Image: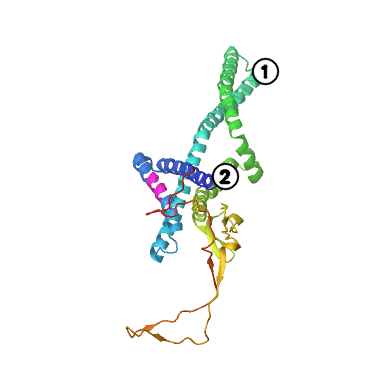
Amino acid sequence: MIFLTLLSALLLSGIAAYYSVIGLAAIFTGAFWPIVFMGSVLEMSKLVTTSWLYRNWKTCPLLLKSYLTFAVVILMLITSMGIFGFLSKSHIDSTLDAGANQVEVKTLNTQEKIAKERLDYLLARAKDPSTASNRLDKQIQDTQKELNEISKRKLPLLKESNKLVAEVGPIKYVGDMIYGTDDADAIDKAVRLVIMLIMIVFDPLAVLLLIAANMSMNRSSVGKPIVKDGEIVGVTAQDIPVFVPEKEEPKETDKVEIPKENIVEIEENIPEQESIVIDEASGESIPPISKSKRGFPNRKSKIDSMYVDDAELAFRKKENK
């Protein structure tokens, strides 16, 4: 999950950086490549600053912390502005041909209206015998030809306009639903609304995902102590189980038993108050011997050993004969 969060944050940040850089370059068209280099470095610095701030938030000085936070917020606004410029430019490019077609169609409609009015006037004069003439008939024919030419010029333009309307059809319906069909600028208003919504969840989401990835990495790197029977027996990372071996009781095979017949008791008298004995020859005191009943191996009993008793330096195993 940590890898997916970090990957999503980096991909989202990369796409936002691309849109922002191209959008800023479209705003400042006089210096394309300098704007591209500047925007790329600023976007990378924003991500590094965000990660550094999260990891050093408690130890960072207040003045430095405040400035870096302010810088990240301003860079997010710049990125959002670049995204707005990029998406707005793409919408304008897609509707530019439609606008040109609409202007040409309006011009042809005006010419067609004038030609139709002239044709109606000429036909009205032709019905009157006093004004009918060959010259009037020729004018009627020329006007009809003009109307036919206008219709031929309008046909491809109308096809192209219908195609462009089909391309922007979804946003047109959104605009009509929000602003109504009577608003001539419904499409442009709807496009601006959609771009603003994208801006809200684009770059801010990338920054927050980067912080979330840092939080996950910190939690996975800090271990939790495992306490058992009041003692710390191990450390585990979050969500990673660690096997803690249980304390094993000594097995029967680990115990050494000495046969009872090989133990003898030596009885010694223990006086209630020990007296100090002085050596007559040296005049030094001899410590008294404490006498008690203790258990010693029975040296008189024969114990069959597998080692040679008279080895000089170490035990040596007997050879099987």
Q: Main secondary structure of the magenta part?
A: helix
Magenta region: 39-46
* Farthest-out residue, top: 134
Residue 18 seen in render:
yes
Residue 43 is inside the magenta segment: yes
x, y percent for residue 11: 49, 42
Nearer to us in this view, 164 or 111: 164
Residue 30 seen in render:
no
Q: Residue at x 59, y 60 (%)?
A: 259
Above or below, comparing residue 106 to residue 52 in the picture: above
Above or below, comparing residue 27 to residue 258 in the picture: above
x, y percent for residue 127: 67, 18
Residue 21 shown left or right of residue 223 in the figure: left
Residue 221 shown left or right of residue 60 in the figure: right
Q: Residue at x 65, y 21 (%)?
A: 124
Q: Amino acid at mark 1?
A: Lys
* Farthest-out residue, left: 282
Badge 1 density bin: few <14, some 14–19, many ≥20, Cα 10 Å:
few
Q: Nearer the viewer, mark 2 or mark 1?
A: 2
Mark 1 and mark 2 in contact (Cβ < 8 Å)? no
Q: In whole angstroms, how far apart are the C-alphas of marks 2 and 1?
A: 60 Å
Q: Which mark is residue 127?
A: 1
Question: Circle 2 — which element?
Answer: helix
Q: Amino acid at mark 2?
A: Val
Badge 2 density bin: few <14, some 14–19, many ≥20, Cα 10 Å:
few
x, y percent for residue 98: 54, 32
Residue 36 shown left or right of residue 165 in the figure: left
Q: Which residue is mark 2?
A: 194
Above or below, comparing residue 223 to residue 24 in the picture: below
Mark before the other along the chain sequence, 2 or 1: 1
x, y percent for residue 115: 58, 24
